[in-house]
Image: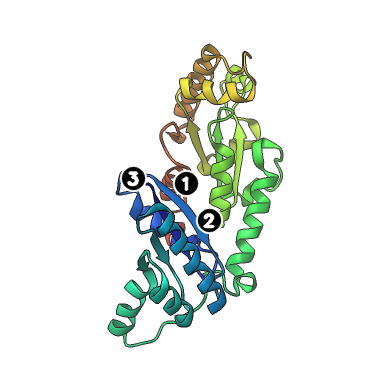
């Protein structure tokens, strides 16, 4: 199958179009080249987009796939009439039937971030990001009572990206602490966390994968050696079992899957988006 160029076109950021489009494309074994075209909010920009799509069609001799979340009907009409690609209008597919069923008109608002900076939800999300950055890798013990989840695990098991994802996507205040040899010698969690056990969630990882990740950071070190990784992971998992902490292995899971599992366990109400 020839390479297909896929365009994601929006009068906003294009994140919705790309997220939805990628979910659809994941059902097919095919090679694609992705082109995101955000902020296409005028007829002039629409004509430029049409030229870009048609150029790809001519060069590759196959129709590009075009996902759009365009709200402006004049802009959409230019692309609908002029482009040589397979057009998938997501708002047209879902919004118009809903308008008919509900008997009301949609807001036809450009992007889900419109006026977001004025909302309490946006303020809370920024606060959560700042909190997670301040409490990354155990660098602060202050205000842990405000944390909604505290992630623990060996170094490079995925704590930092998961904390930031929870903050950015769900406005969740997430701290994270590495489990280190001193903790294993004491056979106890870090003392600063003992009062917050109900908020703790553990991340583990297969030692082989951990060794690969650490080798990229510190090659030929004890820190990255497979023997050391096996010992640390074994000690960490034993500690979490003794403490009765919920935990999962991040080895084959995406950040989205890890975060969703944590939300289900810690704050299931946050799953509503």
User: Does dot 1 land on a helix, a strand or a loop?
Assistant: helix
Give me the residue at 40% from left, 59% from top.
57
Q: Quadrant of the C terminus?
A: bottom left
- Label 3 or label 2, whichever lies nearer to me, is 3
Residue placed under numbered mark 2 in the picture: 169
Q: Which mark is residue 30?
A: 3
For label 3, the crowd category at 10 Å Cα-Cα, with few meaning under 14, some 14 to 19 and many 20 or more, is few
Task: Compute the Cα span from label 3 to label 2.
Answer: 29 Å
Query: Is residue 73 depicted above or below 250 in this figure?
Result: below
Instruction: Give the residue drawn at x 60%, y 65%.
Output: 122
Q: Is residue 256 left or right of residue 133?
A: left
State if disc 2 and disc 1 touch (CB < 8 Å).
yes
Estimate the x, y position of residue 262 in percent, counting from the top left: 45, 45
Labelled pair 3, 2 in contact (Cβ < 8 Å): no
Q: Which residue is mark 1?
A: 259
- Which type of secondary structure does the marked residue at label 2 adopt? helix
Tell me residue 66's x, y (percent): 40, 63
Left or right: 159 as drawn, with respect to 17: right
The Cα atoms of the two marked residues, 3 and 1, are separated by: 28 Å
Q: Is residue 140 above or below residue 232?
A: below
Total numbered labels placed on residues in the image: 3
Of mark 3 and mark 2, the one earlier in the sequence is 3
């Amino acid at each position: 199958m020839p390479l297909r160029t896929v365009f994601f076109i929006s009068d906003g950021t294009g994140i919705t179009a790309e997220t939805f489009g990628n979910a659809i494309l994941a059902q097919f074994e095919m090679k694609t080249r992705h082109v995101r075209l955000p902020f296409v909010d005028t007829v002039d920009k629409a004509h430029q987009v049409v030229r870009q799509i048609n150029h790809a069609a001519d060069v590759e001799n196959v129709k590009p796939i075009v996902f759009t979340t365009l709200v402006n009907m004049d802009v959409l009409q230019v692309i609908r009439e002029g482009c040589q690609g397979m057009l998938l209008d997501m708002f047209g597919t879902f919004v118009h039937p809903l308008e008919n069923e509900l008997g009301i008109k949609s807001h036809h608002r450009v992007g889900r971030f419109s006026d977001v900076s004025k909302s309490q939800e946006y303020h809370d999300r920024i606060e959560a990001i700042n909190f997670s950055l301040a409490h990354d890798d155990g660098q602060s013990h202050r205000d842990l009572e405000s944390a909604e989840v505290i992630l623990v695990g060996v170094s490079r098991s995925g704590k930092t990206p998961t904390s930031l994802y929870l903050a950015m996507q769900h406005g969740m205040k997430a701290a994270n602490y590495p489990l280190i040899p001193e903790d294993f010698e004491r056979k106890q969690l870090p003392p600063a966390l003992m009062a917050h056990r109900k908020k703790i969630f553990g991340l583990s990882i297969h030692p082989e994968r951990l060794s690969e990740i650490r080798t990229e950071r510190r090659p030929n070190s004890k820190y990255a050696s497979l023997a050391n990784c096996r010992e640390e992971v074994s000690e960490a998992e034993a500690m979490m079992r003794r403490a009765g902490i919920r935990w999962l292995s991040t080895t084959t899971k995406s950040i989205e899957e890890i975060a969703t599992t944590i939300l289900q366990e810690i704050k299931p109400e946050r799953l509503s988006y």
